Image: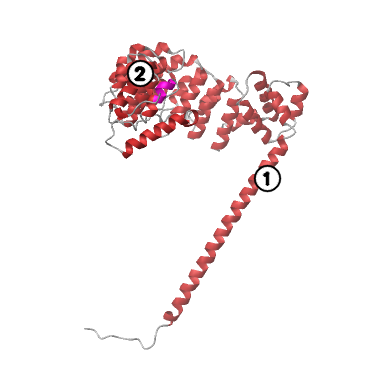
Amino acid sequence: MLPSYDDPSPSLLDDVAPEIASGVLTASLWVLIAAIGVLVVVMIWAHVARVSRSRRIARVLEPLRPRLLALAADEESDDESLGKLGRYRERVVDRAVLDLLGKVRGGAATALVDILDRHGTVESALRGVHSWSATTRARSAQVLGATRRTEYSPVLAGMISDRDRAVRSTAVRALGVLGDATYADAVLRAVREVKGLSGVPAYVAADALLAMGDDVREAVRRGLDDPDPGVRYVAATVASRGGMASLLPRVLQIFRTDRDERVRAAAARTLGVIGDARVIDDLGRALAPREPAAVRLAAATALGEIGAPAGVPLLRSVLAAGDRRLAEVAAGALASLGRTGREVLVETLRQGVLPPEISVRDTAATSPADLAALASLGAVTALGIRDRRPDLYEMAATARRATENDPERAPQQEDPAP
């Protein structure tokens, strides 16, 4: 064993080390305090700057607001008024005009766009589509779309291939505002992923196509056959627009055979909107347990929207399904299917086939007597029912609490309210 060794002359570092550690700790604390102080100052400065900017904008707009509102209401369009407005070239006026352009049509929109022309905003937007800044390109697309001049459609269509996704989405929205169905195919293709660039969100493309009107029918027909599932999904969604009932055979075909469950679910929703009772059997088969959950939910919703009596037994068959969400959708669909559907719903609740904790949400078309019967069984928690019928909501809540506290209590022991 080595002998213990005590150094009779400690190193100088042994005395200095604690002082160094203490100094480093103190310096770190001061740096942290300083950083917190700077952060607080920056936050206060940002708040003050934001308030100051808002007040400055309000001061700029105050003398112009009556004229802008008069133009937006199409009550003032003389050259003198436009001339007075045209002298204000501040960007804040352009933003106010762009906000108003989203709410007006016709002559009022033309007068407001003239203001942008006088300020050089439209010309600047045409130059801005080639800017290195994605923010500038997106704002330029917004301005060009707000003009509602179809002459800018080719420019916006070219921006659909922009390297920035936000710019592409803004360009698609702008094409929807222009309403030029010539570029409907380009809007559909914008959903695809190309060379590692993700496509625009499906809802953005769908909204733009819906805004273009019935002239997109042929583009939608082609989209239903596109190899990209995202394009098929958007096409199946847009096919629900009124005036596209001629697409029913193709929509039904992709509902039956498409490999993408999102596409099939969108097709099911469209079939429900079209409302042709000939598809009820296909929708009923889609309620089978082997089908994806999204397809089953969409099929149940579609059966309720079609509103045919033939859908009642199909919906009743899934009330006791293990999928609670599917049971709720089916219950809501039955509640909207007239007296027969509501009677089936009340009967299944009383028999215990449908658990009382299931919420029946679609009660807009339910009669007061049926609502009372459902509430007595604890099955009404529809959105808004608390405000519209607080007595029935309380009845449903009481019945539900009683069932939870007494599991042995059978649903058939509940008596419906008179």
Badge 2 amino acid:
Gly
Left or right: 337 in relation to 291: right
Secondary structure under badge 1? helix
Q: Residue at x 56, y 29 (%)?
A: 141
For residue 226, which quarter of the picture?
top left
Q: Residue at x 67, y 28 (%)?
A: 116
Q: For this rendering, which residue is in front, 403 or 32?
A: 403
Q: For this rendering, which residue is in front, 347 or 14?
A: 347
For residue 345, which quarter of the picture?
top left
- Where does label 1 land, which residue? 52
The mark nearer the N terminus, 1 or 2, is 1
For residue 289, which quarter of the picture?
top left
Residue furthest out toward the left? 1
Q: Residue 169 magenta-drawn?
A: no
What residue range appears in magenta? Answer: 366-372
Left or right: 38 in relation to 361: right
Left or right: 203 in relation to 95: left
Residue 228 visible, this orientation: no
Q: Residue 368 magenta-drawn?
A: yes
Q: Measure the C-alpha gap from mark 1 to mark 2.
A: 60 Å
User: From what the image shows, is residue 265 above or below residue 34?
Assistant: above
Image marks 1 and 2: residues in contact by CB distance under 8 Å: no
Quadrant of the image for the N terminus? bottom left
Magenta-colored segment: predominant secondary structure: helix
- Where does label 2 land, which residue? 341
In the rendered image, residue 346, in percent from the top left (x then y), is placed at: 34, 23
